[in-house]
Amino acid sequence: MYLDARRCWTAPSLLAAQGGSTIPTHARKAGVQGRDVMFPWFWFWAPQVRLPFSGDVAQDIDPRLDGFFAGIKPEAGNARIEARAFEVASYGDQLGVITRLLIEMAERQPAKAQAASEPLRELRDIRDRIEVIKQEEYDRELAALQARMRQLENRRRRASS
């Protein structure tokens, strides 16, 4: 007969010193003899080792940026305010508005001043390169969705024929 070591583990010397049996009560009621009881003498030398992917796997798919905002130093700003501001507009949105504003203000200057402004050329170049990246990503996503739609239409045609 085998018993669960967690339920049977009692200190035999402690029970004997108190005048009791070295067999736990629930084991005695089950008719277990002293030789049948398992005392895990070396339980502290038998650690439980879990290799990667060997235990329960839980994944949180909600993107959490708490660690990002928690990294903001107190003298640099308030992390909670930054997180709430990020919910209103991402950093990219904020920079986009600032970039458009700066370019609009610079374009109100005389043409001679605009032509001489190296930072304005750099800002326009950065804005244009980012717009190309955005357009490429939108086109790639649209092509993937169109390909998926064609697959679904083909599957529907095969199923109906």
Image (cartoon, helix red, strand yellow):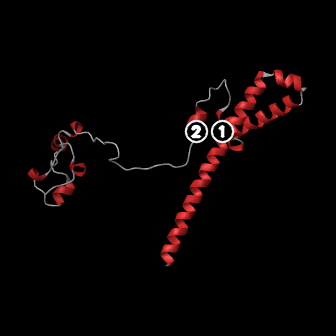
Q: Pointer 2: residues within 10 angstroms few (<14), some, or many (20+)?
A: few
Q: Nearer the viewer, residue 108 or 32?
A: 108
Residue 102's x, y, as percent? 81, 31
Which residue corresponds to the image point at 89% horizontal and 30% vertical from the top-left? 108
Q: Pointer 1: residues within 10 angstroms few (<14), some, or many (20+)?
A: some
At label 2, which amino acid type do we have? Asp
Is residue 28 depicted above or below 134 in this figure? below
Which residue corresponds to the image point at 70% horizontal and 31% vertical from the top-left? 126
Q: What kind of element bears circle 2?
A: helix
Q: How many marks?
A: 2
Residue 118's x, y, as percent? 77, 22
Mark drawn on residue 66: 2
Quadrant of the image occupied by residue 107: top right
- Residue of label 1: 83
Side of 6 relative to 108 (left or right): left
Quadrant showing the N terminus? bottom left
- The mark nearer the N terminus, 2 or 1, is 2
Quadrant of the image occupied by residue 26: bottom left
Residue 7's x, y, as percent? 24, 51
Find out whether the residues at labels 2 and 1 contact each other: C-beta distance under 8 Å: yes
Side of 100 relative to 85 (left or right): right
